[in-house]
Image: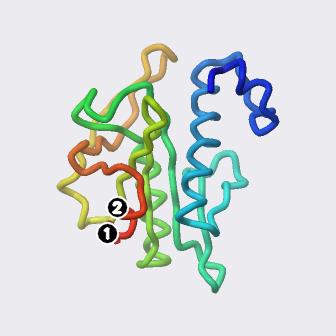
Amino acid sequence: MNIEELKKDKKYAKVDFEHADLKLGQLGEITTYDKLKVLFPKIQKSKDFFSPFDYYSNDENGEIDLLVEVKTRRVNINTYPTLAFGKSKMSAGNGHRRKNKNIRILFCWLLENNELYFWEYFGSKSKLEYEFSYISNVKRHQKPSESVMVKTEFIKPFNYHNILSAK
């Protein structure tokens, strides 16, 4: 589906097609939500715009048992040796893990050709799978911020088998 077809689809009515990076992220969230919903039927979009995670679900007691952050990138899985997200998101996940040790925390990347990948963060058990670095978006004139650089060898295609075996 190209941009002109998407503009006509009611599902994408709220997407701002005039701002490329914003558009990419918004389309990524819509595409990813549909894929997440298949494996996590209780998943919901975070209502707080400033929430560090895009999606969550609650267990039968109303406690958060799943957090998902989605990053959309114009690269393939092998373009770089790592994929990144802000360290503050990992810190927020650690806060939730202190409340619920069984919580699942997924970082997803929607890459070129709508390929969805994920990395599950298991706290200290995952420490060999990533490193910290300061990076910035030069196009947006951002100051460098501390980021988590996940090694692509630990990032898996998002599918039923990989999600179940990651637990």
Q: Amino acid at mark 1?
A: Ser
Residue at image location 63% in from the left, 84% down from the top: 60
The numbered dot on residue 78 is none
Observer-nearest residue: 21 or 87?
A: 21
Does residue 39 sit above or below 89 in this rendering? below
Dividing the picture into quadrants, the one containing residue 164 is bottom left
Q: Residues within 10 Å of mark 1 (few under 14, many from 20)?
A: few
Q: Is residue 8 left or right of residue 159?
A: right
Q: Which element is circle 2 on?
A: helix
In percent of width and height, residue 92 lies at: 48, 58
Name which residue type carries label 2.
Asn
Which quadrant of the rendered structure holds the N terminus?
top right
Mark 2 and mark 1: Cα distance apart in space: 5 Å
Q: Residue at x 36, y 64 (%)?
A: 161
Q: Is residue 124 left or right of residue 16?
A: left
90 sits to left or right of 43: left
Disc 1 element: helix
The image position of residue 132, as x and y in percent, is: 27, 43
Residue 98: x percent and y percent?
A: 44, 74
Is 121 above or below relative to 102? Answer: above
* Disc 2 to disc 1: CB gap under 8 Å: yes
Mark linked to residue 165 = 1
Residue under circle 2? 162
